[in-house]
Structures are given as C-alpha cells and as structure tokens.
Amino acid sequence: MEEAQPLLPSNDKEIIKQSANDAAENLPPLIELSPTNKFIPETDQPQLSDMEVHHHTGHAHGKKTWKTYFWEFIMLFLAVFCGFLAEYKLEHVIEHQREKEFAQALYAELLDDSAVAATKLTSRLEKEKDMDYLSSYFKDSSLANLPKKFYPAYTTSLYLINTYSFEPKDGILNQFRNSGMDKTEMINKN
C-alpha cells in the first residue's frame, strides 16, 4: 500500500511559500509603465482596439452635381442674408433705445437748467432793484447818514457780480453734435 501524503505541509515555511504562490497566480500580469520601475496591472491599460475613428463625410458619395452646388449656394446666401437682416434690426432697436435715453437725458438737463435759470433770474432782478436803489440814493441823499438798507444793496450791487450769471448745461447737446446725426434727421425723427 502506498502511504498517504499529508494534506497539510509539515513546515511553516512551506505554508507561507504556498500561500504566496496561490496569491501570485490570482493577480493579473504586470506591465512596466515607466523607467522608474513602477508597475500597473494590464487590465488598467487603455485598450487601443476600442478607440473610435472619425470618418470624414462626403468622400464616399461620389461627385457632386450642379444642383448640389446650387442648393449649397442658396443655403449659404440665405444664411448670410438673414444674418445681415438680424444685425440691421438689432442696430435699429439699439438706436431707438439710445434715442429714448438721449431724450430723457435732454429733458432732465433742460429741467435742471430751467430751475437754475429761474433762481438766477429772481436773484438778478433783486440785484437790479438794489442797483436802482443805490443810484437813486446817490443822486438825492447825502452820504453822511446811511440807512440799514444801503449796506446790503451796496454789497449785492458791487461785490457779487458773477454769482448771477447763468451757464446752461450742454453735455447732451454736445453728444448730439458729436454723434454725426445732422439737424434734419433730429427734426424728422420727432
């Protein structure tokens, strides 16, 4: 009779060696990635056979006829023409919005100017009254005894000369002048 071989190895070294061999058999093969001796499993490598190839269209269909060229020309012409129409419409809308903004700004500027002109006008009329008072006082009275009204009238008339001048704001009007639009276009738009 033959002797039965033991199912388990008798030595601890043999057990470790056999388990290492079993583990190595179950791992995927390794491929060298770089000269630094790093390895990665072969299953992680990109598969070249699965790559998609870009095919150019139109080469396998044969020669184009004059009808094909004609329709391509018509389609390109319509695309460019529609682009010009869209650009023209957009420019028209933008110009219309700009006109409204200019009109509102001009109105606000004129409103401010009219308020400033009204206050300057009342101040100017008061200054003229004071000057009339002073001229009549100098003609008829002596300068020995001066009334209380004389000092403010004298100060207003002789010292506050430039405070009553009116200078209108013309920023929006300058923008109109520099915009290139002539006066007939501005009048015709209104």
Image (cartoon, rainbow, N blue to C red):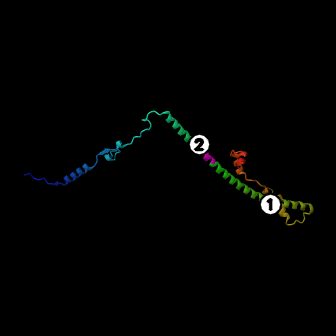
x and y percentages locating residue 5 in the rendered image: 13, 53
Q: Local crowd at mark 2 within 10 Å, few (<14), some, or many (≥20)?
A: few
x and y percentages locating residue 46 in the rendered image: 35, 45
The residue under label 2 is: 84
Q: Amino acid at mark 2?
A: Phe
Q: Is residue 37 magenta?
A: no
Q: Is residue 56 left or right of residue 100?
A: left
Q: Between 78 and 21, which is closer to the camera in this rendering?
A: 78
Residue range (magenta)? 85-92
Is residue 168 placed above or below 77 in the rendered structure?
A: below
Report the residue that reaches farthest toward the front: 67
Residue at 54% of width from left, 38% of height from top?
A: 74
Q: Local crowd at mark 1 within 10 Å, few (<14), some, or many (≥20)?
A: few
Name the secondary structure under disc 2.
Answer: helix
Residue at 62% of width from left, 46% of height from top?
A: 91
The residue under label 1 is: 122
